[in-house]
Amino acid sequence: EPLCQALAMPRIQAGSPVELQRSRSLHVAFQALHAFHQEQGRLPRPRAPEDAEHVLELARELGAPLGPLDEDVVRAFASVSAGELCPVASFIGALAAQEAMKAITGKFLPLEQWFYFDALECLAVEGAPGLMPEDCAPVSARCCWVLQCCACPHSHSSLSWQRGSRYDGQIAVFGADFQEELGRQKYFVVSRVRAEAWHGWGFGVQRLCPQVGAGAIGCELLKNFAMMGLAAGPGGEITVTDMDTVAHSNLHRQLLFRAADVAKPKAEVAAAAVRLMNPAVRVTAHQAQLGPGTEQLFGDTFFQQLDGVVSALDTLTARECLGGAGMSPVSMLLGWMHSPLLPIGAYLESRCIRSCTALLDTGTEGARGSVLAMVPPLSRPLEPGSDPTDGSFPLCTLRFFPRAIEHTLQWARDEFEGLFQLPAESVNRFLEELPEEPARWEGLAVPERVRRSLQERPQDWGDCVRWARRHWQCRYHDSIAQLLHDVPPSHESSPGVPFWSGERRCPHTLTFDPGNDTHLVYVEVAAHLLARAYRLSSCGDREATRDVLCHMVLPPFVPKDKCYIPTAEGMEEVEEALEPRQLLELVQELVQWKQELGGGTEAMDPIHYDKVPYHRAQGGGSASHRTAMSPRSSLQDDDLHVSFITAASNLRAENYGIPPADRLTSQRIAGHIVPAIITTTAAVAALACLEVYKLVWRCRDLSCYRNSNLFLSECLLLRIQPLPAPTYWYQGKEWSCWDRLEVHAIGEDGQAMTVRELLAWLQKEHGWTVTKLLRGSTMLYDGEEDEEMRARQQAQRLSEGMECSTEPRKLELQYVCAGDELEDACPPLLCTLP
């Protein structure tokens, strides 16, 4: 439809009838704003009531055909229309980029006409409605306004609106005092989950713990924080820690990293990028894992001084590793008493609950995203996540220790890209960007993939088969043998705790067998794919392939000492500058290789795997336009691609004792693996930053906060108020889930309280008779023991068994009182030790 018709009778995408009416009011408000600007030659002044009323009058004239006008929305819109907020711009930009991707790829449902987004609830927080024009003036304008008031206190007409600060757009919305408060914030960004063992309570279990750092959402958050000015003032600080290094696979969705950063620590690179964007932001980078083992660094004192935590886990299912709110304290207590294993999850959330620190939980899965707000003491703690019902598997959950066929299939997909797509693209890109003058080659960085592609360049079909056989040996025998050399099956991560236990399956090496169909298919398909990548003729004769294999002699495996356990994103190699002579020889060989392609046509391979005409068509075109290599796209769904993914996945599954999957099952599961999309991460990070604004205001009104669910594939956004904090009854009194018993556990002698003194305090203050008292899995007091044992238990100090510290120590105890065995919950007991 023509724009004039779409303006007059818009079709607006909305999640509910209420949102539709609100969007119609915004539709009219934007038209009224344009009319105001055309009439006045400027935008409405921030927080100027007369300008807002004038916009409202224009909206009334324009909006009659669209139904009732929400005048409060129009006034709020007009009062801040001169402002600019980075999160809003980021969200709208992400939606626009996703619509462009829909148009290019033909996937997902495109937006029909209009979509309106607002976060006007940010203006309803306590303190925001009372802002005056002078509070929201730009930096230079406020100076002029003060001088003007000194000369004529009643004159505001000469107020200067010159721009003088990078935050002026934000100040126009929230005021200068808010900007200063934003600069004083201390935030912690959590972005990844990895396995570790918990040993803090005298036993070891495998569990997932969050790792803080700069993943896909984390990068977007850090970028937004820098532009917002978060932690850019006195006392402000952003903490980022990540044990990973930058990988090539990060570059397409993590905008803080560049190709030159590959193999460098993520935390340091991200921190440097933030400082470059905004030198005033104070960001501290660590390479430490968040978990019980690093509580000296990220302990109670650290969490208590934070203003907020954002868990940017890049996956909707990772919340299951963080949420323990579904278990009551008594249920967890009884579970610990009867089981040697700790329930998975709840670590980060428990730290935030214990310190009453706000937590914003974000996650993405393809085009889906969510933001959940946990605001003490207003909202309900986060609930554990659940696995998606559509069988999808998020990309970022891939780890080096597979335990399911989904993991091996994703590994096989990455193998395909790393062998047959990325190297070819790197070679072609390098040659395209190579300066024509040899004098400019000095000091040029050559990607490792380019060097390896040249070193491994096959000359004929036999070379392709030999390469595939060597790669089989490397992946399914040598790398596993090296891993078992570094971490033998009998290795213990701590005394009595086997390393290979829980989620870590102990692998075993494979021995190549030409009579094994899976082994032979892998070599055949890999050889065909390599031949196509290098534009060589291939052979469909299986006996010829067997003959090549029979004449191969591979060197015996020799383990290397002091090797690290590789991870999915830790195997990238650094791009180094070569010596001038080496570089000249390498580039000349690459150029000669490309020139050799100019004289002939690409050979096609008549093999039984290729039933799709896509490959044959791809080989066409003039030789002058042909690139040096032919990348094999991982998005293709032809026989060769599927055969390689299936064989590679099942071989790795055999390494780890995982049941294999047939071809159709592998094709179905691999097709449902959801990659990370930068548009979704940008939109989700933007929604989280809008909640940060409310936390900075220290908003105590739960109705101002929003939980968000985003579906970019349908351009659908659902935002609802978080659920209020639940209450429960214990010992005849109603308690909030955020209530706790806090005691300064200092005895009469100035040392830590004894168990007897603590029991007496509980009896005196609350009238409770405690029958069981525990610290983790350690029973401090049990009323069912005999009198002598109870006397010994009561005499021990609460600090026994704890490490000495120069700072006050926090101790969380679990207890059961007489008559409450059937109670579902009880307030936690927090003791501050000297």
Image (cartoon, rainbow, N blue to C red):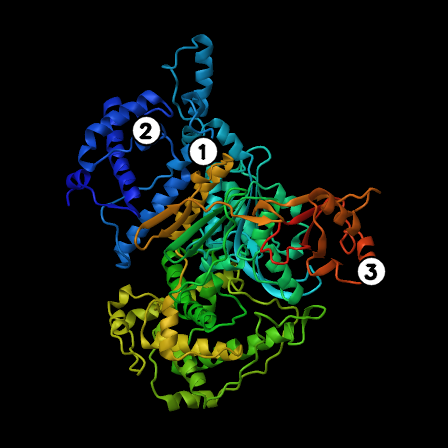
Task: Choose the circle earlier in sequence order: 1 or 3.
Answer: 1
Q: Is residue 335 visible?
A: yes
Question: In the image, 353: left or right of 513?
Answer: right
Q: Which residue is mark 3?
A: 787
- Amino acid identity at mark 3: Glu
Nearest the viewer among 456 and 542 is 542
* Residue 363 image offset from top left, x and y in percent: 45, 54
* Residue 381 image offset from top left, x and y in percent: 52, 49
* Residue 488 image offset from top left, x and y in percent: 65, 75
Task: Give above or below for 217 relative to 282.
Answer: below
Question: In the image, 478: left or right of 679?
Answer: right
Task: Choose the circle earlier in sequence order: 2 or 1.
Answer: 2
Residue plotted at (37% across, 65% down): 390
* Residue 59 image offset from top left, x and y in percent: 24, 29
- Marks 2 and 1 in Cβ contact (< 8 Å): no
Task: Give above or below for 678 relative to 601.
Answer: above
Q: Which residue is mark 2?
A: 75
- Looking at the rendered image, the quarter that the C terminus falls into is top right
Front position among marks 2 and 3:
3
Q: Crowdedness of circle 2 by 10 Å Cα count: few (<14), some, many (20+)? A: many
Q: Which residue is mark 1?
A: 125
- Amino acid identity at mark 1: Val
Q: Is residue 601 visible?
A: no
Q: Crowdedness of circle 3 by 10 Å Cα count: few (<14), some, many (20+)? A: few
- Amino acid identity at mark 2: Arg
Task: Choose the circle earlier in sequence order: 2 or 3.
Answer: 2
Q: CA distance from mark 2 to mark 1?
A: 16 Å
Q: How many marks?
A: 3
